[in-house]
Image: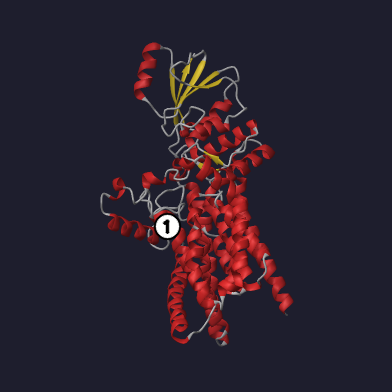
């Protein structure tokens, strides 16, 4: 019977993973519409790495980014060519692996396969998780790193020995090579230590060797980037955070407490009430969790607080040792710690991307509520059991349905997402590629943005990436450019004053508005010089 149950659970897990993979890869070339400039900068750095055979630990373009994800993108581009799908391939990969990691961590923490399967299903079908698994941002590595780091950590606590702590340390150190938010992760371990000491007898004496092994393993994978940050290029460590930090006097206007209260509040409401208003991160104005997973999360969150306080009281008053205290404290600490990168900034809140490190704790906390409901069902009489299991089934089915339809129907059809991902730059690239090779093609990169090391603004990079080694006679206009005719000039941003000057100098110039995706607001201006 037990073997049959494990087989069934294994089949369910495999099905959830396949569903997660499908939801993260289906029609990846066209949804979301367009290649966002930040993704394209990753692609440009990856192409430069391939061509120079220099794969960096840290890439300074676009305010600086850790190099691991970009180097993996370079591998994908080298294997599968310069295209949007290849650039996003590892986002799909890590987004899917995060589902497996969530299952493993939930099973280790909750000690129930059913609860772990629910947690895996919730993150597999979450709009929040699906969305970032389809964008070429390095942040998608965080849920993967988080889940496997702490899966092996808690497995090591349960089984003893060194192997799990070595793996946990390797993943933990690797996290510093992923996304800036992971730099807060050591705080989770620091705050967890008192709870470990309360729950495990002689904890320090029993686990100090394992702790040392963990730290040594972490140094192996974190060492190179730590050397980069603290020895060779310390100026890269802060990145862009100083400009948006709540501690900046320009940001808090001398009212740090009030600013923090506002940012914490905005960070918390995004889960259930009012979400990230950026179409690249969320479907505004809705919260990042659908109503059903949101209710499960709120229930689990309140339960965790109540049980943590209860177990702490029992430990202090009655000397009871209960390892559930470690589990509950960990989930609460991890949630609030990984929320810090969001609420310590004051730009664009709520911000689902900066809080991506909370994904795994959120869905495990939601699974706690679902597990409680399932447990009550199994303890009840047949009729009540059917009702409770039916409610749970409806919650899970409705949650998945809402998220999938929201992304693949409403998000796909909404013109706002095409604008948010700058589809017009992708359409400009498609138009340029359709022109005859002998036509001289020029792009006026006047859409703004930070200039990167190829001398062009970030907004020009989608065109640079998508036309790389695929087009002849293409130049980006600069003051020294000598336009050869016949020529076609694309304006990245409509400029009436420039057009008037061209009309006076070239009376025969033809001005057109090209609209390759009618209704999406992604039309652009083309000037033809015969």
Q: Position of residue 355 (x, y in %)?
A: 46, 56
State the residue position of label 1.
340
Q: Position of residue 57 (x, y in %)?
A: 58, 42
Q: Position of residue 9 (x, y in %)?
A: 67, 70
Dot 1 crowding, Cα within 10 Å, few <14, some 14–19, many 20+: some
Q: Position of 38 compared to 469: left or right?
A: left
Furthest-front residue in this view: 205
Displayed quadrant of residue 274: bottom left
The vertical placement of 81 against 371, above or below, is: above
Displayed quadrant of residue 527: top left
Q: Residue at x 59, y 29 (%)?
A: 468
Q: Residue at x 45, y 76 (%)?
A: 308
Give the structural element (helix, strand or loop) at label 1: helix
Residue 297 shows in the view = yes
Q: Position of 385 compared to 81: left or right?
A: left
Residue 288 shows in the view = no
Quarter holding the N terminus is bottom right
Front residue of this view, candidates 17 and 171: 171
The vertical placement of 403 against 30, above or below, is: below
Q: Position of residue 29 (x, y in %)?
A: 59, 42
Furthest-left residue in this view: 254
Render colour scheme: secondary structure
């Amino acid at each position: 019977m037990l073997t049959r149950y494990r087989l069934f659970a294994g089949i369910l897990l495999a099905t959830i993973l396949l569903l997660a993979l499908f939801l993260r890869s289906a029609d990846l070339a066209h949804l979301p519409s367009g290649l966002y400039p930040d993704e394209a900068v990753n692609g440009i750095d990856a192409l430069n790495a391939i061509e120079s055979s220099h794969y960096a630990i840290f890439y300074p373009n676009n305010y600086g980014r850790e190099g691991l994800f970009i180097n993996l993108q370079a591998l994908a581009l080298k294997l599968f060519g310069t295209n949007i799908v290849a650039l996003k391939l590892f986002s799909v990969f890590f987004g899917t692996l995060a589902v497996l990691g969530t299952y493993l961590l939930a099973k280790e923490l909750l000690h129930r396969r059913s609860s772990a399967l629910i947690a895996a299903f919730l993150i597999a079908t979450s709009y929040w998780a699906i969305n970032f698994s389809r964008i070429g941002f390095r942040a998608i590595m965080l849920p993967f790193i988080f889940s496997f780091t702490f899966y092996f950590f808690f497995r090591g606590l349960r089984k003893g020995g060194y192997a799990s702590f070595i793996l946990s340390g390797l993943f933990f150190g690797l996290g510093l090579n992923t996304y800036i938010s992971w730099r807060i992760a050591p705080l989770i371990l620091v705050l967890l230590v008192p709870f470990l000491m309360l729950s495990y007898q002689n904890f320090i004496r029993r686990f100090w060797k394992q702790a040392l092994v963990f730290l040594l393993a972490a140094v192996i994978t974190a060492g190179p980037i730590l050397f980069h940050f603290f020895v060779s290029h310390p100026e890269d460590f802060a990145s862009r955070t100083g400009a948006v930090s709540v501690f900046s006097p320009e940001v808090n206007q001398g009212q740090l407490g009030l600013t923090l209260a506002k940012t914490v509040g905005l960070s918390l409401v995004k889960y259930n009430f009012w979400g990230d208003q950026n179409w690249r991160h969320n479907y505004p104005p809705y919260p990042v969790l659908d109503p059903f997973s949101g209710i499960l999360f709120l229930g689990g969150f309140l339960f965790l607080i109540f049980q943590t306080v209860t177990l702490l009281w029992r430990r202090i008053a009655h000397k009871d040792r209960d390892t559930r205290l470690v589990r509950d404290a960990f989930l609460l600490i991890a949630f609030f710690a990984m929320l810090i990168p969001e609420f310590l900034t004051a730009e664009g809140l709520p911000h689902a991307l900066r809080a991506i490190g909370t994904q795994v704790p959120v869905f495990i906390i939601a699974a706690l509520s679902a597990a409680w409901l399932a447990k009550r069902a199994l303890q009840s009489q047949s009729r009540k059991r059917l009702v409770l299991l039916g409610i749970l089934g409806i919650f899970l089915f409705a949650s998945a349905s809402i998220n999938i339809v929201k992304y693949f129907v409403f998000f796909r059809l909404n013109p706002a997402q095409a604008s948010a991902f700058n589809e017009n730059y992708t359409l400009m690239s498609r138009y340029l590629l359709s022109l005859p090779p002998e036509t001289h093609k020029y792009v006026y990169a006047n859409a703004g943005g930070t200039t990167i090391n190829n001398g062009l603004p970030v907004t020009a990079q989608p065109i640079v990436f998508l036309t790389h080694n695929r087009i002849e006679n293409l130049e980006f206009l600069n003051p020294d450019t000598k336009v050869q005719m016949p020529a076609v000039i694309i304006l990245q941003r409509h400029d009436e004053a420039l057009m008037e000057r061209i009309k006076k100098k070239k009376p025969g110039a033809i001005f057109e508005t090209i609209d390759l995706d009618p209704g999406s607001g992604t039309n652009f201006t083309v000037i033809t010089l015969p």
